[in-house]
Image: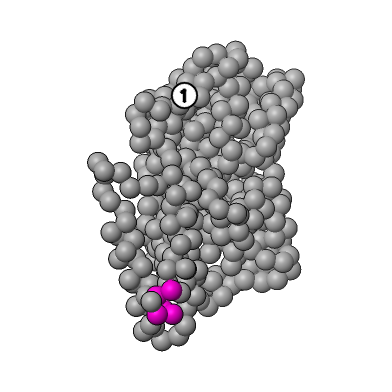
Amino acid sequence: MNKLRIKVIIGFLPLIFLLFLTGISPAPEEEYIYPHLKLFAKVIAIIQKDYVREVKVKDLIIGALKGMLASLDPYSQFMTPQEYKEMKIETEGKFGGVGMVITSREGVIIVVSPIEGTPAFRAGIKPGDKIIEIDGESTKGWSTSKAAQRLRGEPGTKVTIKIWREKENLVKKITLTREIIHIKSVKGPEKLEEGVFYVRITAFREDTSEELKKALEKAKKEGMKYLVLDLRNNPGGLLDEAVKIADLFLPKGKIVVYTQGRNKKERKDFVATSPPSFTFSKPIVILVNRGSASASEIVAGALQAWNIAKILGDRTFGKGSVQSILPVEGDYHLRLTTAHYYTPRDICIEGKGLEPDIKVPLSKEKEREMLEAFIEGRWKDDIYIQKALEILTGKKKEEEKKVDQG
């Protein structure tokens, strides 16, 4: 046996070990795995023999594993120890970066939502923007993890991105200065009119449900009769917090969301566990847009399904898949999609999003104006909030009345 073959076999053993650790083994009734592994080993041998430069077997195997997971969907991922560490940093809610949630679709990096109050948000980056370059390097074919690592860094350092806003046919370079990103979960309450209060949830993190409960209790003491709950540009977060927040409004025993994986018998229901803490004589108005994703869609979908709320705005992002973090070996992990989220109306959120009860179509110009108003806190110029007030109070703005009268 020559040295090349020995090197390939020795390097190939970790892959077989990984497969056994994840519970994959050949079965007589199923497609055999080993013949395909033989093909895989031959390809590695050819690369090692003929590729223009020397490549380590370990790097080839890790690259193959990354490609295998990326071929499943935009969210599944093979994580190296460094990537696993980065993921844990993100979940702590404090890191150096530019402040946007991103995903990858068909090899294109897409902004799910800028995080409010961050450099990305202040620069006017929008949900749906495609990041086509980072620091002059094309992002074509990049994983979400690779793009996130390039966007994060030491506070005070700069990163230049090139975005493509397809609907406006706009290509633009934007230089952002990294900051420590602190994600604040709840903003408000703010009194819009007598009896009408506004609360915004920016992300679903630990204790978000407690923060919201305190905000609503404060509003209740100040005379809250109706509620506008803003979930625009909210990229989601923790499922448990989404369920606890829905629990604040739903009757005990009502389904908030359920997950369904490959095995139809393994459906898991998440239900309200206590009587509602807050009730209203009119449905809550929930504001959403294309940047409302994941946990935001779970809360909006649950309250919509049980007629506790009306959804106002634009169709949501459609991020409704469950990722489980599965240890493999050492600090190598899989982030694997194991199920999809379904609303109580049996709507699969993934790839579809939620259709608003009240759709507010906006021209490109109006959308830009509203985004500016939203960033600067000028809620009186926010068309969505004005529409919500109209629904809750029955009052129209004076200029709209004039138009109606002729």
Vertical arrangement, residue 285 with respect to residue 315, above or below: above
Q: Quadrant of the N terminus?
A: bottom left
What residue lies at 47% left-to-right and 68% top-to-bottom?
11
Q: Main secondary structure of the magenta part?
A: helix
Give the percent coordinates (x, y) of residue 138. 46, 74
Q: Position of residue 209 (x, y in %)?
A: 66, 30
From what the image shows, is residue 360 above or below residue 177? above
Q: Secondary structure at mark 1?
A: strand
Q: Quadrant of the C terminus?
A: top left
The foreground one among 387 and 60 is: 60
**Which quadrant of the figure has residue 141?**
bottom left
Residue 126 visible:
no
One can see residue 19 in this view? yes
Q: Residue at x 60, y 26 (%)?
A: 244
Which residue is denoted by mark 1 in the rendering? 269
In the rendered view, does 329 fall on the left or right side of 96? left
Q: Quadrant of residue 151?
A: bottom right
The one nearer the camera, 149 or 30, is 30
Left or right: residue 88 versus residue 389 is right
> Residue at position x 50%, y 24% from top?
270
Categorize mark 1 by other alpha carbons within 10 Å: few (<14), some (14-19), many (20+).
some
Image location (x, y in percent) of residue 280: 58, 17
Q: Position of residue 387 (x, y in %)?
A: 50, 35
Front residue of 56 and 226: 56
Identified by mark 1, the residue type is Asp
Number of on-image labels: 1
User: From the viewer's perspective, is 127 left or right of 154?
Assistant: left
Relative to 56, does residue 250 appear above or below in the rendering?
Answer: above
Residue shown at 34% from the left, 29% from the top = 264
> What is the span of residues highlighted in magenta in the rendered image?
2-6
